[in-house]
Image (cartoon, rainbow, N blue to C red):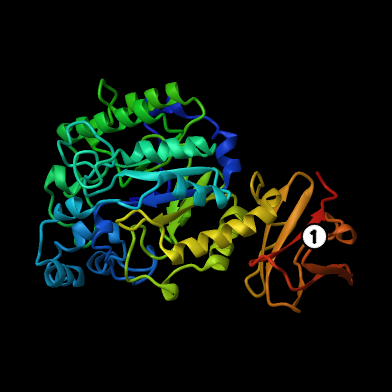
Amino acid sequence: MAMFKDDPERPEQYRRFERTTPAWFQDAKLGIFVHWGPYSVPAWAEPIGALGTFDEEEWFQHNPYAEWYYNTIRIDGSPAQRHHQEVYGGADYDAFLDLWKAESFDADSVMDLVASTGARYFVPTTKHHDGVALWDAPATGDRNTVRRGPGRDLIGEFRDAAERRGIRFGVYYSGGLDWHFTQSPPIVDHIDDTLRPLDKAYADYAFDHVADLIEKYRPELLWGDIEYPDAGKPEGEKSLVELFRRFYAARPEGVANDRWGETHWDFRTSEYEQGRDGEGDSAWENCRGVGFSFGHNRLEDESNSLDGEGAIRHFLDVVSRGGNLLLNIGLTASGEVTPLQRRTVETLGAWNRANADAVFGSRALATGLGRPSDEHWVRWTRTGQTAHAFIDAPEGTRVTLDADGAAMDFAAASATDAGTEVVDGTLVVTIREHAVAGPVRVDIPLRTA
């Protein structure tokens, strides 16, 4: 979850980092997110729907994010609090850190699944709002996965597995909230500055963590969340300015998202339906889970999760509008991907393998050349001098594309799982049976530059 500003402005001390977003990120199109923590033990949240479709009070009282369990169980009268009392007797949250064993976790197995999707980058949570670090983070004492629970440097294992497969490695870090360090009250109806740590003590703590992540794991992507403590924003020895300086010195082609407060960013972000105003002409990324939660949630099933074809459509919708998708999988406490989520990402991967050349490295097609449709689902991309139409409709359906015949050579259109014909100056596509689940693809040469 994030705090978004529609039109952020970089302060003077951060303008030195402004540059064109590296091409690798704009070409990447797909990343895989992993949320994993003590919250994966209870793995419980109400799957009420997508962020951005509820008012904030209802959202926090019935939070569908399992990774927010520590917050939701502290809201008086919430269903999560009742569940926690009935099932765990109101146990202290940190009991879940000791119950979290990751006994079946194999970073190479997880990364094989990530690689099979075609994803170009991978981002695990290193510290979420509960304050538990997935590496031996400075000043965390035994409240990290090396000293307790799994007894392992999970971030190091993820990084090494990603590196072995040539997948770019990023790190998620919650700089805006840490419920343990600050001992802050629960967020009940909205996030404001009284509930967000702003002081120098927390700013120094967060600085030491992110500096350690940069030095130890050399991430190519910094993914902040919620905000960053205000005391750490002015230029200085332990400042966010210094963190960005170190990051770009280590990784000149690295990228950072826009959730470090109103400071610096290489790309904008949206989350489910929230922050969609940031999906503009510059680089952007939409993130979401397979279900309505990022952390593993036992209550999610097929009725409230993307199936494989739904994931493909969402991915194509994002890419067709010029963005990247960061699709999340929530590992179980033992360290496994659930069968439901595995089926979804495997179906996405199979479709991507068949259509990679029309998606990865593509750009949005100008709307004047080809227009999307939801009546018969159609989305467009462009690579070089070829427009690609993706159509999701039942076998036998005839779909007339809303496209510019003067700019496209309809007679030269080609498709492997559809028939094409030019009728009265329009391109009509007939959907055929296809072995790979998901939309069919039509390639159309462009006449114009």
Left or right of 412 on screen, residue 377 = left
228 to 440, vertically: above or below: above
Type of amino acid at the residue the image marks with label 1: Asp
Left or right of 90 on screen, residue 212 = right
Residue at 83% in and 56% down: 408
**Residue sticking out furthest to the front:** 103
Left or right of 221 on screen, residue 240 = left
134 to 97, vertically: above or below: above
Seen from the viewer's position, the closer of residues 68 and 149 is 149
Residue at 45% in and 67% down: 340
Q: Residues within 10 Å of mark 1 (few under 14, many from 20)?
A: some
Residue at 67% in and 47% down: 362
Which image quadrant for residue 139?
Answer: top left
Seen from the viewer's position, the closer of residues 424 and 44 is 44
Q: Position of residue 181 (x, y in %)?
A: 15, 42
Seen from the viewer's position, the closer of residues 390 and 349 is 349
Identify the residue position indicated by label 1 in the image: 404
